[in-house]
Image (cartoon, helix red, strand yellow):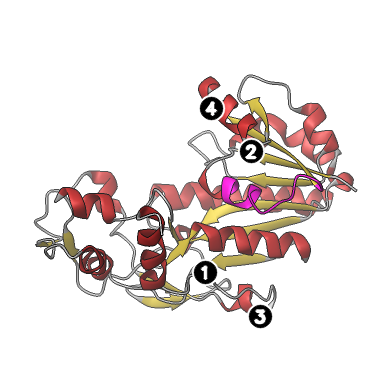
């Protein structure tokens, strides 16, 4: 039986997942906002859809699985704004729907631990928008029985998204802020978690998706430089560093995120359990090893 997988906002994480789904069993439809991105999607045996701009009603009707990666904005969740009625009507045909959220919904815990039961008190606008989008999807699931799964992703890295380019260019900085720690996740481990959930659906469940090692950001930059054999990037105090408002906002929250549920319920064994193994693997890819 061929499954139909509809991916709203077919970006970095969705592409990693799609690479794990054999086309003999899966018909994958991916949306993009850019006309020029349609051919690259087709080249990877993904049926492209321009959205906004296309009628996706038939795709929704045929979908057995839906992944929502599109980010919310001030107007709310774009998928629900455009397709809520169609998704609600077709809910009985869906086996699985995944919503990609962020650990930013937990807010700042001053370096303390959070898990899926921790109260949600986002301290950034991005986190608040994600919280509202989560709630909107949960309301729809409650009303219709939609088989919803929420994945709260930590900071994503992977091929093409790592610190090496800035370290090589001499533009990397080690921003120092006391007690600042971030959780991270390699994109291939995101794909692994999603694949495991698809194989073992548990509607209504929320999963934190992160590795085992929440670490200070300056340590990651330092290790990247060590791997490259380059000088340690300069340390700068957070309070006085020249940073864009967007960059500074990432330091508004400090927490360590527990990932027990993806291991205990989905049986996931992380391919990259910490940033060191992840960066080592990225460097090998870059070097063609």
Q: Which mark is residue 245?
A: none
Instruction: Please report whichever mark, 4 or 1, sits nearer to the chain's N-terminal start.
Output: 4
Can residue 29 be seen here? The reply is: yes
On the picture, is 215 further left or further right than 58? left
Instruction: Please report whichever mark, 3 or 4, sits nearer to the chain's N-terminal start.
Output: 4
Q: Residue at x 58, y 79 (%)?
A: 260
Q: Which mark is residue 8?
A: 2
Check if residue 18 falls in the magenta segment. Answer: yes
Q: With respect to residue 115, does 19 lie above or below?
A: above
Instruction: Please report whichever mark, 2 or 4, sits nearer to the chain's N-terminal start.
Output: 2
Q: Nearer the viewer, mark 2 or mark 1?
A: 2
Residue positioned most to the front:
289
Marks 3 and 4, how far apart in space?
38 Å
Q: Total marks drawn?
A: 4
Instruction: Please report whichever mark, 2 or 1, sits nearer to the chain's N-terminal start.
Output: 2
Marks 2 and 4, how far apart in space?
14 Å
On the picture, is 53 further left or further right than 241? right
Graded by Cα atoms within 10 Å as few (under 14), some (14 to 19) or many (20 or more), the crowding at tag 3 reads few
Nearer-the-camera pick, 215 or 272: 272
Mark 1 secondary-structure assignment: loop
Instruction: Please report whichever mark, 2 or 3, sits nearer to the chain's N-terminal start.
Output: 2
Q: Nearer the viewer, mark 3 or mark 1?
A: 3
Mark 2 secondary-structure assignment: strand
Graded by Cα atoms within 10 Å as few (under 14), some (14 to 19) or many (20 or more), the crowding at tag 4 reads some
- The residue labelled by disc 4 is 37
Stretch in magenta: 14-25
Say which quarter of the image contains residue 5.
top right
Report x, y in % for residue 39. 58, 25
- The residue labelled by disc 3 is 264
């Amino acid at each position: 039986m061929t499954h139909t997988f509809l991916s709203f906002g077919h970006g970095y994480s969705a592409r990693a997942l799609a690479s794990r789904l054999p086309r003999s069993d899966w018909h994958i439809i991916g949306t993009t906002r850019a006309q020029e991105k349609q051919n690259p999607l087709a080249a990877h045996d993904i049926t492209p859809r321009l959205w906004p701009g296309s009628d996706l009603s038939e795709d929704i009707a045929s979908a057995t699985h839906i992944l929502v990666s599109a980010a919310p904005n001030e107007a709310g969740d774009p998928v629900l704004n455009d397709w809520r009625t169609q998704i609600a009507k077709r809910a009985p045909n869906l086996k699985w729907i995944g919503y990609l959220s962020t650990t930013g919904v937990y807010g700042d815990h001053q370096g303390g631990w959070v898990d899926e039961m921790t109260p949600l008190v986002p301290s950034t606008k991005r986190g608040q928008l994600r919280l509202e989008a989560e709630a909107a999807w949960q309301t729809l699931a409650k009303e219709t029985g939609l088989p919803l799964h929420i994945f709260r992703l930590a900071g994503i890295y992977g091929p093409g998204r790592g610190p090496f380019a800035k370290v090589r260019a001499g533009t990397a900085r080690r921003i120092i802020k006391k007690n600042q720690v971030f959780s991270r996740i390699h994109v291939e481990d995101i794909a692994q978690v999603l694949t495991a959930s698809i194989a073992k659906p548990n509607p209504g469940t929320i999963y934190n998706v992160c590795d085992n090692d929440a670490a200070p950001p300056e340590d990651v930059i330092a290790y990247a430089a060590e791997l490259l054999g380059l000088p340690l990037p300069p340390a700068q105090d957070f309070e006085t560093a020249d940073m864009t408002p967007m960059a500074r906002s990432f330091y508004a929250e400090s927490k360590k995120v527990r990932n027990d549920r993806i291991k205990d319920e989905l049986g996931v064994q992380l391919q990259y359990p910490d940033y060191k193994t992840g960066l080592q693997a990225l460097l090998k890819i870059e070097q063609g090893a």
